[in-house]
Image (cartoon, grey):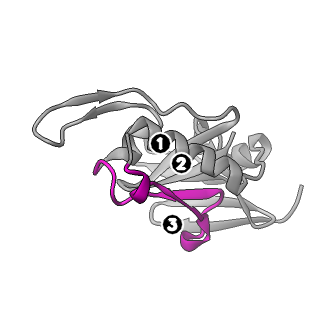
Amino acid sequence: MGKIELKAKGLRIEVYRDGQQIGRVWWSCARERYIAAAMTGPPIGEHPLRTTAIDMVTKHATVTEITDEIAQQVADAISTHFRADPDYAPQVMHADWDGGAGRVIVWSEGLPDWAYLAGDGGTSDYDYMSIEYAPVPLPAGVWVEPVNPQTLRVMAR
């Protein structure tokens, strides 16, 4: 099973197994319960007790390594999708700068809200017009999570 550690980040608790983030648990004021999510993206479940929610994460989560090569494939897909200038393309970084898992893609020269649009698509209201964007096509077994408007975390399903 491995060594399980919990790290508080704001209102949520991140769950680590052997130093690798495997999920998170956070308090939802709207529902007044704890919600558990594996790093695969969707919530695993919710429960009034935090310990039960953490158990949900540790039982359901499976994490594999995201290599630089896979992260670069995602960065290239983002570059193509949002028509990046080749001289100022998205850059792959290790995610250890914020204590998270996987890799991150940083792109300060792109559309100001590209990281929020990459995973699920949506509408951007920049440049005086609303533009609808489809999600960026991702390699199989990969999902993305925005860190901020110009940084995206790449994780394994």
Whether the residues at callouts 1 and 2 have beta carbons within 8 Å, the answer is yes
Residue ID for mark 1: 78
Residue ID for mark 2: 75
Location of the N terminus by quadrant is bottom right
As rendered, which of 38 and 127 lies closer to the eye?
Answer: 127
Q: Is residue 149 magenta?
A: no
Q: Amino acid at mark 3?
A: Lys
Using a 10 Å C-alpha cutoff, classify the residue at mark 2 as few (fewer than 14 neighbours), some (14 to 19) or many (20 or more).
Answer: many
Using a 10 Å C-alpha cutoff, classify the residue at mark 1 as few (fewer than 14 neighbours), some (14 to 19) or many (20 or more).
Answer: many
Residue drawn 44% across the image and 39% down it: 118
Closer to the chain start, of discs 1 and 3, is 3
Q: Amino acid at mark 2?
A: Ala
Residue drawn 40% across the image and 47% down it: 115
Provide the secondary structure element on which disc 3 rests. strand
In the picture as drawn, the residue positioned furthest to the bottom comes out as: 97
Q: Amino acid at mark 1?
A: Ile
Using a 10 Å C-alpha cutoff, classify the residue at mark 3 as few (fewer than 14 neighbours), some (14 to 19) or many (20 or more).
Answer: few
**Position of 19 compared to 83: left or right?**
right
Provide the secondary structure element on which disc 2 rests. helix
Whether the residues at callouts 3 and 2 have beta carbons within 8 Å, the answer is no
Residue drawn 37% across the image and 50% down it: 85
Q: Position of residue 151 (x, y in %)?
A: 44, 57
Provide the secondary structure element on which disc 1 rests. helix
- Labels 3, 2: front one: 2
Label 3 to label 2, Cα distance in Å? 27 Å
Q: Which residues are magenta?
A: 85-112
Which image quadrant for residue 5?
A: bottom right
Q: Position of residue 6 (x, y in %)?
A: 67, 65
**Position of 132 compared to 58: left or right?**
left
Disc number placed over residue 9 in the picture, else none:
3
**Position of 5 compared to 7: left or right?**
right
